[in-house]
Image: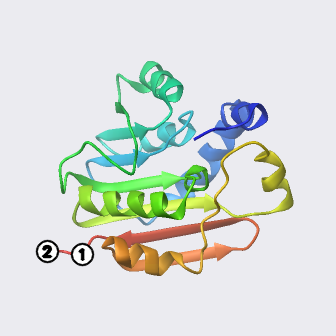
């Protein structure tokens, strides 16, 4: 979804890549991603770079055409890069061992589209598969960074119920107000 110039510069910077490289491994510790992982909305690929070290097969789906081309150029020999929407994924039911999304949900313009992403994540996961993610929460600095951007912050209090409606179980949500929300859920075994 649309990002202003300053936001694009930050998310494509070495500073951001280093921050993600420092923070994301700890966020994933203790979670088994399995052998076939899908990342929704990797943007410039800082999270993709970390995920490539944690799974034997990685697929990424990115809605922005320019970012998809950049990801294909950067990681196409190590990951399958698909240009498309996380709300309408072209993957078969039950394909992935884990689905992840990091700091991208607030770029989805409506709660209904976010819910469609949750439902699609459940559909493409294997029974017992993990859905893990994080997203930023509103603060003054966050709002300033998003001037002219799509910014639809996830309601952390409503997230467990939204994940259940999408077909998940074992939802866990951790909310740090004005900073972030992190979540995990499992697709129930058939």
Q: Where is residue 163? Give x, y as percent.
A: 41, 73
Task: Mark 1: give few (<14), some (14-19) or many (20+) Cα within 10 Å.
Answer: some
Residue 10: image tag? none
> Which residue was labeled with disc 1?
188
Depth check: give the residue in front, 121 or 32: 121
Looking at the rendered structure, the number of numbered marks drawn on it comes to 2
Q: Can you tell which quarter of the image residue 139 is in?
A: bottom right
Q: Secondary structure at mark 1?
A: loop
- Are circles 2 and 1 on residues that touch, CB within 8 Å? yes
Task: Mark 2: give few (<14), some (14-19) or many (20+) Cα within 10 Å.
Answer: few
> Which residue was labeled with disc 2?
190
Instruction: Tell me the quarter of the image containing the N terminus.
Output: top right
Q: Secondary structure at mark 2?
A: loop
Q: Where is residue 51? Give x, y as percent.
A: 44, 44
Instruction: Tell me the quarter of the image containing the C terminus.
Output: bottom left
Q: Where is residue 103? Give x, y as percent.
A: 59, 52
Residue located at (35% from left, 47% from top): 38
Residue 165 sits above or below residue 82 on the image? below
């Amino acid at each position: 979804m649309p990002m202003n110039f300053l936001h694009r510069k930050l998310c494509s910077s070495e500073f951001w890549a280093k921050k993600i490289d420092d923070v994301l491994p700890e966020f994933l510790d203790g979670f088994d991603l399995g052998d076939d992982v899908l990342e929704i909305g990797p943007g410039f690929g800082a999270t993709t770079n970390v995920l490539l070290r944690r799974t034997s097969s990685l697929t990424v789906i990115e809605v922005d055409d320019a970012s998809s081309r950049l990801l294909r150029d950067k990681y196409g020999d190590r990951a399958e890069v698909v240009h498309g929407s996380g709300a309408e994924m072209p993957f078969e039911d039950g394909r992935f061992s884990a689905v992840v999304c990091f700091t991208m949900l607030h770029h989805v313009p409506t709660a209904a589209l976010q819910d469609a992403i949750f439902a699609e994540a459940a559909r493409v996961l294997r029974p017992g598969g993990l859905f893990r993610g994080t997203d930023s929460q509103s603060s003054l600095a966050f709002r300033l960074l998003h001037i002219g951007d799509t910014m639809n912050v996830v309601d952390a209090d409503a997230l467990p119920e939204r994940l259940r409606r999408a077909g998940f179980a074992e939802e866990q949500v951790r909310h740090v107000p004005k900073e972030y929300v992190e979540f995990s859920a499992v697709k129930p075994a058939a």
